């Protein structure tokens, strides 16, 4: 299922998506911090492994969510100013 462009979404849909993204960003941020801490620990104990790069793999997804939330907030702000 393809998502609708932000400009075609209703205000209620935008608010719901913003709320969901906010929660997802918070959870993902905590998970990335925990993965980074465990990757550092594993790297110091056992050397390089696949789990060492996992936090780096999730960073693009994290930044995409932040960028999408900024776009949604900008659209909501522009609709409130009209």
Image (cartoon, rainbow, N blue to C red):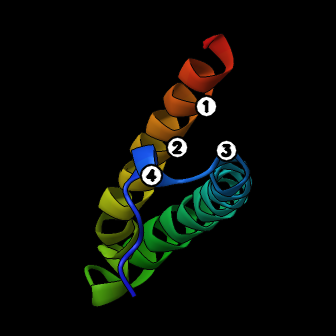
Q: Which residue is mark 4?
A: 8
Front position among marks 3 and 1: 3
Q: Secondary structure at mark 3?
A: helix
First-in-chain label (2 vs 1):
2
Q: Which image quadrant for residue 17?
A: bottom right
Front position among marks 2 and 4: 4
Q: Work out how far the residue at label 3 is from the one at label 1, CA to CA, in angstroms.
A: 7 Å
Q: Work out how far the residue at label 1 is from the one at label 4, CA to CA, in angstroms.
A: 12 Å
Q: Work out how far the residue at label 2 is from the one at label 4, CA to CA, in angstroms.
A: 16 Å
- Give the quarter of the figure containing the C terminus: top right
Q: Work out how far the residue at label 4 is from the one at label 3, CA to CA, in angstroms.
A: 9 Å
Q: Which mark is residue 7?
A: none
Residue 52 location in percent, x, y? Answer: 34, 75
Q: Which residue is mark 3?
A: 11
The 10 Å Cα crowd at callout 4, few under 14, some 14 to 19, many 20 or more, is few
Left of 30 or right of it: where is 61? Answer: left
- Which residue ends up furthest to the top in the rendered image? 81
Q: Are marks 1 and 4 in contact (CB under 8 Å)?
A: no
Q: Are marks 3 and 1 in contact (CB under 8 Å)?
A: yes
Q: Which residue is mark 1?
A: 76
- Give the quarter of the figure containing the N terminus: bottom left
Q: Secondary structure at mark 4?
A: helix
Residue 69 location in percent, x, y? Answer: 52, 43
């Amino acid at each position: 299922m393809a998502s609708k462009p932000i400009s075609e979404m209703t205000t209620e849909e935008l608010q719901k998506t913003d709320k969901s993204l906010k929660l997802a960003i918070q959870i993902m941020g905590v998970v990335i911090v925990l993965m980074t801490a465990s990757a550092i620990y594993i790297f110091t104990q056992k050397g390089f492994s696949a789990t060492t790069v996992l936090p780096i793999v999730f960073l693009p997804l994290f930044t995409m969510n932040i960028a999408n939330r900024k776009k949604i907030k900008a659209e909501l702000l522009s609709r409130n100013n009209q």
